[in-house]
Image (tube, rainbow, N blue to C red):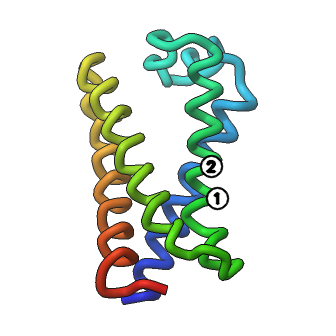
């Protein structure tokens, strides 16, 4: 089961690393044109802050365990991802974007699984 949890953590980290890097490297208008219409509801600073939080989440899902420094932070980061995805789901629901909601629900479900596994029966 530990391998499954590592894979889930890796997939989540890769997803948030790429999403966060995109939000930090692209202007808000470019993100909106590329299909991320939700950015129209947020200022450029807020979009960058979301990107920074996503990068921190990616780091928090992997680095504490890999480095062996405070590995209890992995399930804490996973819990943060759940909260982040709850906000994203609500934003997409408000905008009537069901396909985007599906992605956020899947990511949240993966993060719940990771938090359960690492807080519970399969800690490091």
The image shows residue 105 at horizontal and vertical percentages of 28, 47
Which is more toward the observer, 1 or 69? Answer: 69
Residue at 63% over, 71% down: 64
Name which quarter of the figure residue 90 lies in.
Answer: top left
Residue at 49% over, 24% down: 36
Which disc number belongs to residue 59? 1
Q: Are discs 2 and 1 less than 8 Å apart at CB?
A: yes
The quadrant of the picture occupied by the N terminus is bottom left
**Element type at marker 2?**
helix
Q: Is residue 49 above or below residue 1?
A: above
Residue at 66% over, 69% down: 63
Name which quarter of the figure residue 44 lies in.
Answer: top right
Which disc number belongs to residue 114? none
Name which quarter of the figure residue 4 lies in.
Answer: bottom left
Callout 1 environment at 10 Å: few (<14), some (14 to 19), or many (20+)? some
Is 58 left or right of 90, judged from the image as shown?
Answer: right
Question: According to the image, label 2 marks what residue?
Answer: 56
The image shows residue 51 at horizontal and vertical percentages of 61, 35
Callout 2 environment at 10 Å: few (<14), some (14 to 19), or many (20+)? some
Between the C-alphas of marks 2 and 1, the distance is 5 Å
Q: Is residue 124 above or below residue 89?
A: below
Which is more toward the observer, 33 or 80? Answer: 80
Residue at 42% over, 78% down: 5
**Element type at marker 1?**
helix
Is 54 left or right of 87, judged from the image as shown?
Answer: right
The image shows residue 8 at horizontal and vertical percentages of 44, 70
Which is more toward the observer, 58 or 92? Answer: 58
């Amino acid at each position: 089961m530990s391998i499954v949890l590592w894979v889930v953590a890796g997939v989540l980290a890769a997803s948030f690393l790429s999403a966060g890097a995109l939000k930090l490297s692209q202007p808000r208008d470019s993100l909106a044109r590329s299909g991320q219409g939700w950015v129209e509801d947020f200022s450029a600073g807020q979009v960058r802050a979301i990107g920074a939080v996503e990068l921190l989440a990616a780091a928090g899902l992997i680095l504490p365990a890999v480095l062996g420094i405070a590995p209890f932070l992995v399930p804490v980061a996973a819990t943060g991802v759940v909260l982040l995805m709850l906000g994203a789901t609500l934003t997409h629901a408000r905008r009537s974007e069901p396909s985007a909601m599906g992605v956020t629900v899947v990511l949240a479900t993966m993060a719940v699984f990771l938090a359960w596994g690492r807080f519970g029966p399969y800690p490091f």
